[in-house]
Image (cartoon, grey):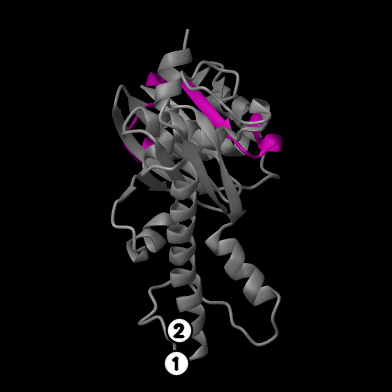
Amino acid sequence: MALAIDIGNTNIVLGCFHGETIHFIARIATERNRTAEQYAAEIKSIIQLYDRDPKKIDGSIISSVVPPLTGVMKRAVEYITGKTPLIVTPTMESGMGIQIDDPNQLGADLLVAAVASVNRYPLPQIIIDMGTATTFSVINKDGAFCGGSIMAGVGLSLNALTSGTAQLPAIDLSQPPKVCGTNTVDCMSSGVIYGAASMVDGMIDRLEEELGESCSIIATGGISKLIIPHCKHQNIILNDDLLLQGLADLYYKNKK
């Protein structure tokens, strides 16, 4: 059994896996001022919560887009397992070509999702990850990462809207009754949900037009399940486990 951890800007996703089997997936808040001991205690308790024995963890892998926490989490995992974890980097063995201007700038989360997607779905692909940021990754017909786009995520945009205006209230992300709202809350919900869905539809159209061919469309990330059902593209595959699957793929490809 191995431990996988993906450190995002808002949440840390973690889980245990063996082969293709993911035993559980959990999320904890990303807090930059926590110590390795604090993270170790929380992660160990989560592993035990899911009836897994931390002593039976044979290895681990970490991907991170929060550099100050990478070393902290590495020490936390060493406290739990007694072993040094693998750290995802663009230079590690992934089996994927990286055709961007500077491969070292490729985010660990984008690489992990791309590896999982290429191993599971037909090429070419567009991978949509909806978290703190919303990212689109393009994988060409040869299985190479060839670019994409990055924009503010749904939650980040909503927070900016409420904090930057005097009269718009803070609201939860929820299903609007219709596109044309008749009160402030419904209008905001419509703008957030349907606006994001329309953006996803539009970006898919533009990326496929630029590539000159249709793509497999894969969506992941904590907010994707709220947005993707409202998209007009009916062929989008939702995969909440994509990051953990990619971490497992990279772990087995790189472990000694």
Secondary-structure class at tag 2: helix
The numbered disc on residue 182 is 1
Position of residue 111 measured from the top left corner of the image (x, y, whole percent): 52, 31
Which residue corresponds to mark 2?
A: 186
Q: Closest to the observer: 107 or 49?
A: 107
Q: Closest to the observer: 174 or 105?
A: 105
Going 40% across and 48% down the picture, which residue do you hit?
219
* 37 lies above or below 177: above
Going 61% across and 84% down the picture, which residue do you hit?
168
Q: Closest to the observer: 51 or 72?
A: 72
* 214 lies above or below 253: below
In the image: residue 171, left or right of residue 66: left
Q: Quadrant of residue 54?
A: top left
Position of residue 137 measured from the top left corner of the image (x, y, whole percent): 50, 41
- Report, in whole angstroms, how far the alpha carbon at label 1 lies from the one at label 2: 7 Å
The magenta stretch spans which residues?
Answer: 48-71
The type of residue carrying mark 1 is Thr
Asked whether the beta carbons under mark 1 and mark 2 sit within 8 Å of each other, the answer is yes
The type of residue carrying mark 2 is Asp
Residue 201 shows up from this direction: yes
